Image (cartoon, rainbow, N blue to C red):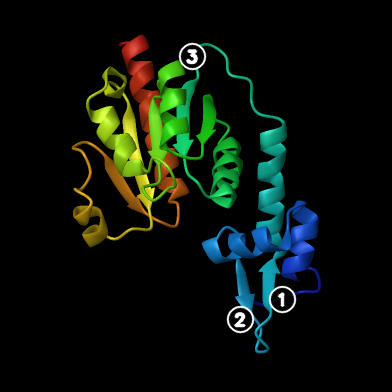
Amino acid sequence: MPASGKFSFCTTREAAELLGVSLRTAQLWVESGLLEAWKTEGGHRRILRASVEQLLADKEAVSNPPVATGAERLRVLVVEDDNVLLKLYKLRIASWALPLTLTMAANGYEGLMHIGRASPDLLILDLRMPGMDGFQMLQTLVHSPFREGMEIVVVTGLDADEIAARGGLPRGVTLFPKPVPFGRLREMVEAILVKREQIECPS
C-alpha cells in the first residue's frame, strides 16, 4: 500500500465532492484508472490526492482552452455511447493544450451527421453502441468520399474473436483495447500536426 501522509489521500466520496461529480462517476474513474487508488484491509478505496488535483487541473483546461493561432485547428471526433468515457475524453484531450477542436457523438448516426458537416482529421470510435454501432459506421465510411484523409482509431472492449465474428475492421483502421490509451492517442494527434506542418511549410 502506498505511503500516506495526513493529506495524501481521500475517500471516493470526498474525491467526488472535490471534482463536482457523482459518487458513481468517481467510482468509474477509479475503475478505469483515471484516479489512482488502492483498497484498505477493510475493502475501502483510498484515492491519491495528487490524481484528484490532476483532474481538477484538466477541468480548468476545459474551462479555459488555449487559443489557437496560425494554422487551422485539427478536428477530432469521438463517437462513444458511455457518458463517463465521453467526459474522460473531454478532460484529457483538453489538458493536452494542442490546437484542435473536439466534437462528441453518442452513436454512429450522430457521428456520420458530424462528419457530413465537417469531416474530422481524426475519428475515435467505439464498436459496441446502440442504434448504429461502430461496425456499421465504418462500413458506411468505407464507401464514402469523407474517408479520404481521415485517420480512424477504434477503442473497444471487444476481443479479437468478437471483432472477427462481425467481419473485422477495414484496412487502415488502428485498433486499441480499452481502457482508453490517452498517451497513444496524443502521440497520434501530435504526429498528424507535424505532418500537416511539413505539408504547409516544406523545407
Q: Nearer the viewer, mark 3 or mark 2?
A: 3
3 or 1: tag closer to the N-terminus? 1
Q: Which residue is drawn at 50% across and 19% down?
A: 73
Could you say where residue 43 lies in the image, as x and y percent from the top left?
65, 84
Task: Tell me if I can see residue 118 in this picture.
Answer: no
Proximity of marks 2 and 1: CB atoms separated by less than 8 Å: yes
Could you say where residue 150 lies in the image, as x and y percent from the top left?
32, 26
Spatial CA distance of label 3 from label 1 is: 46 Å
Provide the residue designation for mark 2.
1
Q: Which residue is drawn at 23% across and 51% down?
A: 166
Frontmost residue, 131 versus 63? 131
Q: Residues within 10 Å of mark 3 (few under 14, many from 20)?
A: few
Kindly identify the amino acid type of the residue bearing the numbered disc 3.
Glu
Which quadrant of the view contains residue 133? top left
3 or 2: tag closer to the N-terminus? 2
Provide the residue designation for mark 1.
4
Describe residue 126's horizontal placement relative to residue 32 as left or right. Answer: left
Which quadrant of the view contains residue 15? bottom right
Frontmost residue, 111 versus 23? 111
Classify the position of the C terminus by image quarter: top left
Frontmost residue, 2 versus 147? 147
Q: Nearer the viewer, mark 3 or mark 1?
A: 3
Kindly identify the amino acid type of the residue bearing the numbered disc 2.
Met
Q: What element carries label 3?
A: loop
